[in-house]
Structure formats: structure tokens, C-alpha cells
């Protein structure tokens, strides 16, 4: 199909392409900027204007655009074998990658389960939590504690874990499965409350929630090391360590959602231990 001008493409975009989190009343009326080319940290729009891609796509282009070595590696593998189901066979790249991730992950996290994206990684983590407790005969230990302003994905189960109300407008979620803790942003703490006092309040929020719900009913606590799309919120120093201690006290699994923070985006392969000093029970990761 030959396109004479950018207006043709914009019409296709408005008439046929449903974008994520689209406001239905605006469908067909937008005139979006188009990313037509990328190199390094830069994007180029339909008019050739050069822009810095600050977020790195969706937090996922930490090595930059247009890397020949990446393109060649992908091309070589596609030609050799682009895909095979892991259900009944394995493949060398999959086994080698699993070993590499296990070596880089903190503590005793040495088993890797591959999914297709961050959302399905969170889905799988929740299902593993439920499976684990079912095997132990603790069939009621299923609730997940999450936090306000958190983001964990866009599939049904991962979206249930999200603490951002605007992500759930007009959408159903499994509300009975999750309990949300109040905002952990120290810059939004009450006036005259010190950061140390705020930290104690946040740890009490977690422990009180477990006690209120009943430790026998709580399977896991899920937390982003940094609440990324919630505002790039860094909790008070020591927050994650203290939360992990509370989880261990009540036999609650700790899921560190590193979909945004892993693979070098905070300067280390994983942020859980190197940046925040914890060895969680499960890490979810993706992007890059």
C-alpha cells in the first residue's frame, strides 16, 4: 500500500488503531505525533524533529535505539529458529538465559519462569503464590496486599493489583482479592511529621492490614521498589527492608515487582538487593 502523505496514516490511526487507555469519546478525533525513526536516546517525528526519549519507550529501551549488535543477534536467531513451545521441549537460548538470570538474581532466586510481558509476569507470580499455599493446604491464604498509586499491569489479574483509580475507570477487577495500603510518598506526608515517623506509620499500615485481614488469609505483599508510573515515588529509606521483616513475621510472601527497575535501569541488574537491600521471595521483571 502506497501512502502519499502523513494525513493518510493519521486517518488510519484515528479510524482503526485503538490506543491503550483510550478515552472512547476521543476515538477518531486525535492528531497524534508519530515516532518515525529512532537512534540512541533520540526519536524523530513525522516532520524530522529530533526529540529526547526521556522514559525510554515504556521504560524499556535502556541500551538505546538502533544498536546493530542487537539487530544482528535477533536476526541470526530468527533465521536459525525463531520460536518453539517450551511445553514439551527446551532450547539452548532459553536454558542459557534462565541460567544467566538466576546467577544475577539476589539470594536463592535460582528458578526462572518465562512469560510474554510484565503484566503476565505479575499474573504468574500471583498464581504461583496461590499454588504454593494450595499445595501446603492453606487454601484461604490468597489475598494480596498492594499499595495506592502502584502499577502492576493491564491484564485482568495484574490490573486488579494496581492502585491507580484512573486505570480502572469502567473496568471490572477482582476487588475481593486485593487490599490497598495508603500512599507511601514521603514528600506527601502530613505536615509536622518527620520522614522517620512517616516510615513507622507505613510499616504499621502493612502490619495492621495483615492483622485485620488475618495472616491466614494473606498470601503475598506486592511492591514496586520505585512506584514508577505512580509518580516515580521512592519510599522512605529502609521501607522495603522493614516490609520484608513484617512479611516474614506473618509468613507472607514478598513479591518485588521489578518490571521497571530491573536490568540496569537503576544501575544494577536488579534493584531489590543492590539498591534497597532485600532478597524477596519472588521477583517479576520484563522490558529490555
Image (cartoon, rainbow, N blue to C red):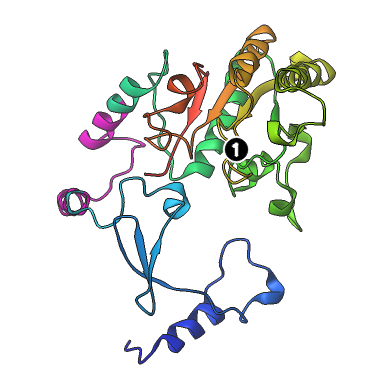
The quadrant the C terminus occupies is top left
On screen, residue 277 versus residue 50, left or right, reads right
Asked whether 57 falls inside the magenta stretch, the response is: no
Depth check, front residue: 48 or 166: 48
Highlighted range, magenta: 70-98
The quadrant the N terminus occupies is bottom left
The residue that appears at 49% across and 42% down in the rendered structure is: 118
Depth check, front residue: 269 or 103: 269
Q: Is residue 179 above or below residue 3?
A: above
State the image coordinates of residue 137 (x, y, percent, origin top left).
66, 13
The residue at which mark 1 appears reads as 227
Q: Is residue 109 above or below residue 157?
A: above
Q: Main secondary structure of the magenta part?
A: helix
State how many labels appear. 1
Depth check, front residue: 230 or 250: 230
The residue that appears at 38% across and 90% down in the rendered structure is: 5
Residue at far bottom of view: 4
State the image coordinates of residue 31 (x, y, percent, origin top left).
55, 79
Amino acid at each position: 500500500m502506497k501512502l502519499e502523505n502523513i494525513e493518510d496514516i493519521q486517518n488510519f490511526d484515528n479510524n482503526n488503531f485503538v490506543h491503550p487507555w483510550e478515552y472512547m469519546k476521543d476515538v477518531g478525533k486525535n492528531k497524534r505525533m508519530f515516532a518515525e525513526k529512532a537512534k540512541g536516546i533520540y526519536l524523530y517525528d513525522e516532520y524530522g524533529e529530533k526529540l529526547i526519549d526521556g522514559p525510554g519507550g515504556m521504560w524499556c529501551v535502556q541500551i538505546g535505539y538502533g544498536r546493530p549488535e542487537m539487530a544482528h543477534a535477533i536476526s541470526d536467531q530468527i533465521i536459525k529458529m525463531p520460536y518453539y513451545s517450551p511445553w514439551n521441549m527446551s532450547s539452548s537460548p532459553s536454558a542459557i538465559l534462565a541460567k544467566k538470570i538466576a546467577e544475577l538474581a539476589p539470594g536463592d532466586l535460582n528458578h526462572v519462569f518465562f512469560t510474554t510481558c510484565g503484566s503476565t509476569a505479575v499474573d504468574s507470580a500471583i498464581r504461583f503464590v496461590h499454588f504454593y499455599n494450595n499445595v501446603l493446604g492453606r487454601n484461604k491464604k490468597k489475598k494480596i496486599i498492594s499499595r495506592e498509586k502502584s502499577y502492576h499491569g493491564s491484564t485482568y489479574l495484574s490490573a486488579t493489583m494496581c492502585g491507580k483509580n484512573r486505570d480502572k475507570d469502567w473496568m471490572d477487577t477482582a476487588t475481593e482479592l486485593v487490599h490497598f495500603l495508603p500512599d507511601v510518598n514521603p514528600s506527601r506526608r502530613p505536615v509536622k511529621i518527620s520522614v522517620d515517623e512517616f516510615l513507622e506509620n507505613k510499616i504499621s499500615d502493612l502490619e495492621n492490614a495483615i492483622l485485620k485481614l488475618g495472616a491466614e488469609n494473606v498470601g503475598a505483599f506486592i511492591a514496586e521498589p520505585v512506584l514508577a508510573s505512580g509518580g516515580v515515588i521512592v519510599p522512605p529509606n529502609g521501607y522495603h527492608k522493614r516490609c520484608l521483616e513484617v512479611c516474614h513475621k506473618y509468613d507472607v510472601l514478598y513479591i518485588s515487582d521489578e518490571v521497571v527497575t530491573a536490568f540496569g535501569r537503576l544501575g544494577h541488574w536488579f534493584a531489590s538487593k543492590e539498591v534497597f537491600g532485600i532478597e524477596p521471595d519472588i521477583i517479576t521483571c520484563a522490558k529490555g
